[in-house]
Image (cartoon, rainbow, N blue to C red):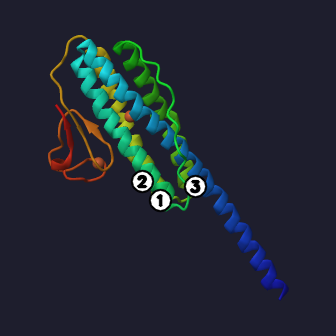
Amino acid sequence: MKAYIITLIAGLAVASVAQAASNKTIDNLNAALRGESNASHKYGLFAKKAKEEGATQAAKLFEAASKAEAIHRDSHKAAITKMGGKPDTIKLDEVKIGSTKENLAAALKGETYERDIMYPDFIKQATADSAKAALRTMKFALAAETEHVKLYQDAIDNLGKNKEVSYFVCPDCGFTAEKRPNRSCPVCGEKAANFIAFK
Ligand SMILES: [Fe+2]
Ligand SMILES: [Fe+2]
């Protein structure tokens, strides 16, 4: 009887540690949900501003990235629910709209933070928690943000030149590229034909 009780208590302790760990990942997913919701909204406004300025390349990139972040937002939300958590209700931050040059710099800063700090930290925690659903959506987002950093840097370098460019966004993982992939998404395997074009 005594051994049984000890085993039971030990089991409950392990379960509560696991629960606490996965709560941490759910908190992280909610933080990412907030970040992606705000980024998608912000880029939509930046796209409008870029159009007003006649910066067509930047406008297209903001539109494509806005769509990609909306895909991450929805996929993070689904992962939270799948893990038994509750997605936060997001109240969008007020957006400070600058010139397109400033907006591109702000976007680059945000994407760089997500690529270098936020997602790597969150993925570390989710790996420790063995949170499969969280890892999937976080890794998808990290891959897309990595491309966004490069694309924003390129848009900054080419601002004012209106380089002829199109963007393609994977509807499943948000991967963003200047060309439609040949067969399938290099990140999630989605069919290339299903990519959303911003021409
Ligand atoms: Fe991004
Ligand atoms: Fe994909």
**Residue 183 in picture, x, y percent from top left:** 16, 50
Q: Is residue 181 left or right of residue 140?
A: left
Q: Are marks 3 and 2 in contact (CB under 8 Å)?
A: no
Q: Is residue 153 left or right of residue 94?
A: left
Q: Quadrant of the N terminus?
A: bottom right
Residue beneath the point at 32% across and 43% down:
174
Residue 159 seen: no
Reading the image, the residue beneath label 3 is 128
**What is the count of numbered marks?**
3
What is the CA distance from the residue labelled 3 to the residue labelled 2? 14 Å
Q: Are marks 2 and 1 in contact (CB under 8 Å)?
A: yes
What is the CA distance from the residue labelled 2 to the residue labelled 1? 6 Å
Reading the image, the residue beneath label 2 is 136
Vertical side of 3 occupied by 194: above or below: above
**Residue 88 in picture, x, y percent from top left:** 55, 47
Badge 3 density bin: few <14, some 14–19, many ≥20, Cα 10 Å:
few
| Amino acid type at mark 1 | Lys
Reading the image, the residue beneath label 1 is 132
- Depth-wise, is mark 3 or mark 2 nearer the camera? 2
Vertical side of 113 occupied by 21: above or below: below
Of residues 145 and 197, the one nearer the viewer is 197
| Amino acid type at mark 2 | Arg
Badge 1 density bin: few <14, some 14–19, many ≥20, Cα 10 Å:
few
- Depth-wise, is mark 3 or mark 1 nearer the camera? 1
Q: What is the quadrant of residue 107 in the picture? A: top left
Under circle 2, the secondary element is helix
Under circle 3, the secondary element is helix
Q: What is the quadrant of residue 43 in the picture? A: top left
Residue beneath the point at 27% across and 12% down:
53
What is the CA distance from the residue labelled 3 to the residue labelled 1? 10 Å
Q: Residue furthest bottom?
A: 1
